């Protein structure tokens, strides 16, 4: 298979490999078509909708002949500003009859489950980032053989000189990480004079396992490094008897993310993740779909899958709220896709969104979360937040994701502080960047591939990762957080 017409009503097809002018691809190609790029299957008049995935991804900016390339030079977005939406529920695609699968995880004192037993060092303010990183390096050199796997610092530039909602969100997200079950122990490091004081931050953290969390104010210590090491050693001692046990897959929480998409992302990697999401939620588990700007143009597909009018209204508020965020800064809502996306064959934001939302499968949307919220209802959740790789992955992790599935057609070394499995949309990327990529979804469009077997292999990789198999980002210490900011810095 060298090209694909995704939906019967599409008037474009997508090249699955580089095609040459003069080739017959259902129509005679008038020009070279790169992998992931589109070409017209019939004549399309100026102003007529371009149809891909069975949905409009824009309108023709000029008359387009059969076999002609369809891309940014001759297609225009249909997107506009804030819209009114009507709820037309369609839950017919919701999966059911999930199977009973298990992974090996850590049962915490509060009943929640973690898939790692790491030490996290959480700075309340950017001023102590280097201290947190130095403590992580030093304690990693001293870690005894046992169940505590490794220490990871979570540096960030905030926690002081922030006002209002920005400051509140920083505290909320950092508190989410303190309570996150992937951490067998957490050392919270403050400076002492920052806005985000340890005293106020402890209130944000709220109820927590006292054996699992320690707090230190650097200005109060004669030697803050020595004190920090002592506290970390106490945390190691408290976690030394933690053991993995058999956990039903219904307790697994997985974040869904894409970055550096290409024209194959919506056909291979995102579709694969969508089928995984359906299987996990049908088994009682939880997935979280974020990246609101990459829902624009496909949002009604998600809205009509909302479980109730109340969830629908929360979804509308999320979508229009993010559009207002764009316009508040004088930006157009369709300032996307990125240059890398365009080079990979994505032409408009609708084109990108219809591919991106495939990661949510066909399941019912059970809840919509604000930034900093944590999952409360099992099933497919939507999470407010931007498309930026680092910020979105941070928000997904803070929301309670044990791991993140990160699809990509261009590749990135980035990873969050939870295992971040990179799924390549094309085989050439998977073969070139073996130290970045965890799974090759590009096989799904190669001749002779058993799609069912690929799905099963992918599901087993995720269970193995939840049971302790390190993701590539963990092997190479690609672990970062980035906190969303929208306001004044003093």
Image (spheres, rainbow, N blue to C red):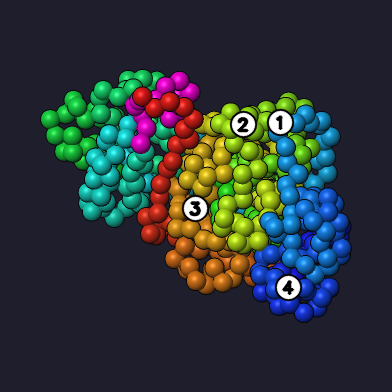
Local secondary structure at mark 1: loop
Say the numbered circle drawn on residue 82.
1
Quadrant of image for the N terminus: bottom right
Say the numbered circle drawn on residue 31.
4
* Left/right of residue 44 with respect to residue 146 in the rendered view: right
Task: Give the residue displayed 48% in from the left and 68% down from the top.
Answer: 433
> Badge 1, how many Cα within 10 Å: few under 14, some, many 20+?
some
Residue depth check, mark 3 versus mark 2: number of the one nearer the observer: 2
Viewer-proximal residue among 60 and 315: 60
Asked whether disc 1 touches disc 4, contact meaning CB atoms under 8 Å apart, the reply is no
Quadrant of image for the C terminus: top left
Residue depth check, mark 4 versus mark 3: number of the one nearer the observer: 4
Local secondary structure at mark 2: helix
> Badge 4, how many Cα within 10 Å: few under 14, some, many 20+?
some
The residue segment tinted magenta is 157-171
Residue 408's spot in the image, x, y percent? 57, 58
Question: What is the distance, in whole Å, between disc 1 and disc 4 at their CAs?
Answer: 38 Å
* Left/right of residue 148 with respect to residue 222 in the rendered view: right
The residue pinned by badge 3 equals 420
Question: What is the distance, in whole Å, between disc 4 and disc 3 at their CAs?
Answer: 39 Å
């Amino acid at each position: 298979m060298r090209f694909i017409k995704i939906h019967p009503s599409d008037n474009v097809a997508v090249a699955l490999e580089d095609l040459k002018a003069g080739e017959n691809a259902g129509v005679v190609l008038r020009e070279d078509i790169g992998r992931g790029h589109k070409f017209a299957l019939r004549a399309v008049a100026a102003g007529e909708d371009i149809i891909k995935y069975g949905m409009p991804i824009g309108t023709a900016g000029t008359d387009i002949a059969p076999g002609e390339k369809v891309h940014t030079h001759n297609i225009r977005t249909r997107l506009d500003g804030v819209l009114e939406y009507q709820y037309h529920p369609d839950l017919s695609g919701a999966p059911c009859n999930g199977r009973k699968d298990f992974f090996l995880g850590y049962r915490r004192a509060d009943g929640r489950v973690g898939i790692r037993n790491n030490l996290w060092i959480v700075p309340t303010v950017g001023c102590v980032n280097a201290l947190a990183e130095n403590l992580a390096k030093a304690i990693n050199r001293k870690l005894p053989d046992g169940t505590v796997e490794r220490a990871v610092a979570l540096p960030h530039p905030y926690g002081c000189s922030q006002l209002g909602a920005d400051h509140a969100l920083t505290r909320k997200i950092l508190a989410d990480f303190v309570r996150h079950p992937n951490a067998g122990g957490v050392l919270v490091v403050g400076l002492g004079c920052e806005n985000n004081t340890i005293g106020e931050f402890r209130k944000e953290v709220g109820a927590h396992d006292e054996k699992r969390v320690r707090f230190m104010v650097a200005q109060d210590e004669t030697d803050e490094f020595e004190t920090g090491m002592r506290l970390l050693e106490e945390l190691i001692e408290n976690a030394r008897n933690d053991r993995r046990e058999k956990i039903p897959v219904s307790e697994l929480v997985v974040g869904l993310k894409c970055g550096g998409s290409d024209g194959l992302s919506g056909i291979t990697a995102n579709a694969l993740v969508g089928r995984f999401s359906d299987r996990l939620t049908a088994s009682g588990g939880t997935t979280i779909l974020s990246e609101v700007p990459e829902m624009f143009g496909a949002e009604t597909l998600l809205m009509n899958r909302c479980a109730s009018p109340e969830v629908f209204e929360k979804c509308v508020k999320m979508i229009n709220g993010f559009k207002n965020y764009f316009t508040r800064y004088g930006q157009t809502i369709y300032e996307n896709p990125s240059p890398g996306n365009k080079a990979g064959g994505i032409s408009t934001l609708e084109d990108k969104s219809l591919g991106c939302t495939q990661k949510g499968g066909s399941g019912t949307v059970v809840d919509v979360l604000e930034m900093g919220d944590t999952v409360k209802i099992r099933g497919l959740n939507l999470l407010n937040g931007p498309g930026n790789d680092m910020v979105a992955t941070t928000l997904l992790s803070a929301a309670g994701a044990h791991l993140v599935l990160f699809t990509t057609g261009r590749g990135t070394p980035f990873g969050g502080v939870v295992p971040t499995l990179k799924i390549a949309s094309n085989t050439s990327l998977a073969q070139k960047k073996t130290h970045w990529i965890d799974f090759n979804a590009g096989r799904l469009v190669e001749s002779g591939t058993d799609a069912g077997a690929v799905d099963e292999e992918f599901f087993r990789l995720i269970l193995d990762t939840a049971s302790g198999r390190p993701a590539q980002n963990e092997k190479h210490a690609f672990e970062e957080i980035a906190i969303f900011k929208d306001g004044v810095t003093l």
